[in-house]
Image: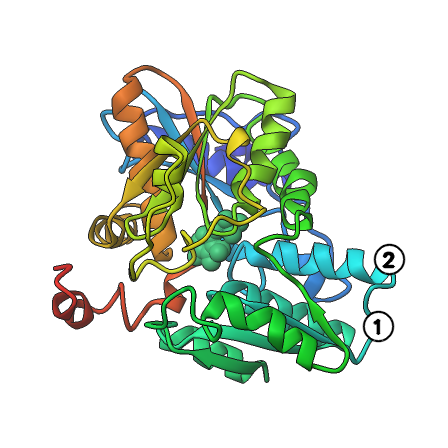
Amino acid sequence: MKRLTDPDRGAINVILNHSNHVHERPFKLSKKHSLFQRIPYRNILDGVGNTPIIRLNKMAAGLKAEIFAKLEFLNPMGSIKDRIAKYMIEKAEKEERIKPGDTIIDNSSGNTALGLAMVCSVKGYKVKMIVRDSLSLEKIKFLRAMNVELVMIDHTLPPESPNSYNNITPRIVRETKGGYYFDQHNNRENNETHYTMTGPEIWKQMEGKIDYFVAGIGTGGTICGVSKYLKEKDPKIKVIGVDPVGSIFYDYFHSKKLVNSSPYYLEGLGDEFLIRCVDFALIDDIYQISDKRAFQLTRQLADTEVILAGGSSGAAVWATLRLAKEIDRPARIVTIFADSATRYLSTIYNDDWLREKGFL
Ligand code: PMP
């Protein structure tokens, strides 16, 4: 315990000294890793990225593989989407596609909207977001608090309706003076964000020792951007996506069939159309998950690891556990926890809601 006085290594030593009690398989931080590298930020945008990776100890107990999760809910607005908001707006600024006073428009399951609300507030743009009326109340309250203009879309409209969530957005952009279509689903700058930021962070944090990368597929930006980077570094790394029952990606990947989508409650994952940011060539397998299983695992994460995450994190951790059981050998599996429980207190973390929907 005497190395505790070392200002750079103190907290790490505390963790390591207790590691036999806490962890099944203790591991050492390498010398070049310091947990204390943060300097004062110029503004909130400097807080985007460089999120920690945590090893899941209790959830992975008894498995031969190790499971690691990158806690993206520790970004300033609470999700991985802060990254694309910052990167893509700054790129559009550099290329003079936008100027202060313009209105940034997109459809979003809430997290991109919040990331954009932050970036645009700092930089002087307006934000108009198209959201489904099934969005969790917490996200709506956050967005209203950030003065984001919301266009609410009836979530029961069929995808082919001209007023559906996907179809109405380009029309609203055309009708808005100074409107800029962010287009997170089809603009490959989304993937580029994760290729330049998230992928290198993961590679560095894991010191290049990764066997599998597992992530939910929403726009596909995260999984495809990270996959491209990791596979360039080590082509042996396998990448597995997670898709909710009701979305179309799982069936398209496995049978090349475009099935009809159906409604589901898991927010942030899946889609009713093929979109440009999902590049199936960068994905080795896709697992399918039900709402019920995703929500059960989300609650289990909170109970066991004290990680209060959103539903897509429950889906991601389920996929890592399934993978670890299937391979049944030592391996390092890395996944992403995209957002936090604060978005879902009235749904996934509310037993009455779970019971009402038949998930409990
Ligand atoms: N989880 C949540 C909660 C999300 O909001 C999103 C973004 N739609 C994702 C996962 C998936 O990220 P991506 O869009 O990069 O595929």
Q: CA distance from mark 1 to mark 2?
A: 10 Å
Callout 1–callout 2 Cβ contact below 8 Å: no
Q: Is residue 347 above or below residue 278?
A: below
* Label annotation for residue 95: 2
The residue that appears at 57% across and 57% down in the rendered structure is 81
Q: Is residue 59 left or right of residue 243?
A: left
Q: Position of residue 329 (x, y in %)?
A: 32, 15
Q: Is residue 48 left or right of residue 41?
A: left
As helix, strand or loop, the secondary structure at mark 1 comes to loop
The residue that appears at 81% across and 68% down in the rendered structure is 98
**Which of the 4 quarters of the picture holds residue 87?**
bottom right
Decide: few, some or many residues near mark 2? Use Cα within 10 Å; few <14, some 14-19, many ≥20: few
As helix, strand or loop, the secondary structure at mark 2 comes to loop
- Judge by depth and name the residue closer to the eye, 35 or 11: 35
The residue that appears at 52% across and 74% down in the rendered structure is 130
Q: Position of residue 159 (x, y in %)?
A: 41, 64
* Label annotation for residue 163: none
- Judge by depth and name the residue closer to the eye, 55 or 147: 147
In the image, is the residue at mark 2 within 8 Å of ligand 1 by its beta carbon? no
* Amino acid marked by disc 2: Glu
Q: Is residue 60 above or below residue 190?
A: above
- Judge by depth and name the residue closer to the eye, 301 or 35: 301
Camera sees residue 307: no
The residue that disc 1 covers is 99
Q: Is residue 120 above or below residue 309?
A: below
In the image, is the residue at mark 1 within 8 Å of ligand 1 by its beta carbon? no
* Amino acid marked by disc 1: Lys
Q: Position of residue 196 (x, y in %)?
A: 70, 40
Q: Is residue 295 above or below residue 132?
A: above
